[in-house]
Image (spheres, grey):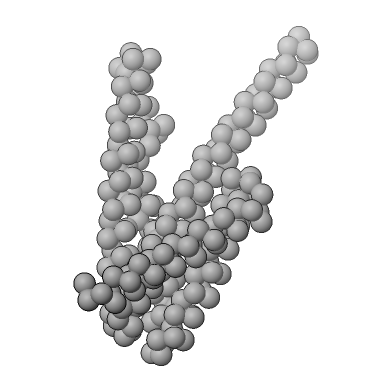
Amino acid sequence: MESHNVNNSLNVDMEKDQEKAFDFSKRAQWLRAAVLGANDGLVSTASLMMGVGAVKGDIKTMMLSGFAGLVAGACSMAIGEFVSVYSQYDIEVAQMKRENGGEIEKEKLPSPMQAAAASALAFSLGAIVPLLAAAFVKEYKVRVGVILAAVTLALVMFGWLGAVLGKAPVVKSSARVLIGGWLAMAVTFGLTKLVGSHGM
């Protein structure tokens, strides 16, 4: 009898540990997705500002291009995430109906609205970094330097966070994110400069 009780207790403890591990795994996935969304916002907005700045370096033009990139990117991310998660929602509802005889456990279903809002917020948080860095610097060359410094720092931080959450090598992950961000800005700057110099 005592052995049976001990086994039951062990089974309950193991189930609790599995639930905790599952919850942590889900949280880690959400956090990693948020970091990737913020990194997208950072790189795309900074690249857009650098590209426009290559042709027209006044602060108003650069800030407007960055703000447009923030709004467009956040909306695009939100809509894409909403459509994707809603498709997953429909699949899980259909599966629950088949397995549970029509009964739906709503607390286990993903929230398309929550996912869309989180995606847009993450993108916006990343995109606001180069905007804030450039906002109060009037001199063009200094402004570009400040943007590069702020974006570099943020890229390293996002790379480190992504590595920790994904249990990947920190140095390699941070280096990949940093070099990728630099390449995106350099290519956008160079191609826009090239096109702009030909009067297009």
Residue at 42%, 57% (x, y): give it: 40
Q: Residue most toward the top?
A: 1
Q: Quadrant of the N terminus?
A: top right
Q: Position of residue 175 (x, y in %)?
A: 60, 58
Q: Is residue 4 left or right of residue 41?
A: right
Of residues 120 and 192, the one drawn nearer to the viewer in this rendering: 192
Q: In this view of the protein, which residue sits in the foreground, 83 or 177?
A: 177
Q: Is residue 165 left or right of residue 127?
A: right
Q: Residue furthest bottom?
A: 139
| Residue that lies at the very extreme toward the left in this rendered image | 200
Q: Nearer the viewer, residue 112 or 44?
A: 44
Disc tally is 0
Quick check: 151 above or below 103? below
- x, y (%) of residue 168? 63, 46
Tell me if I can see residue 54 in this picture: yes
When asked about the image quadrant of residue 99, the answer is top left
Look at the picture and state if 182 lies above or below 15.
Answer: below
In the image, residue 186 sits, relative to residue 55, either above or below, namely above
Task: Kindly identify the residue that appears in the image at 68 percent across and 17 percent down.
Answer: 8
Image side of residue 141 versus residue 101, left or right: right
Of residues 174 and 106, the one drawn nearer to the viewer in this rendering: 174
Instruction: Single out the residue that lies furthest toward the front.
Output: 198
Q: Quadrant of the C terminus?
A: bottom left
x and y, in percent, of residue 6 in the image: 75, 18
Q: Residue at x 53, y 75 (%)?
A: 149
Q: Residue at x 30, y 33 (%)?
A: 87
Can residue 47 be seen at all in this image of the molecule?
A: no
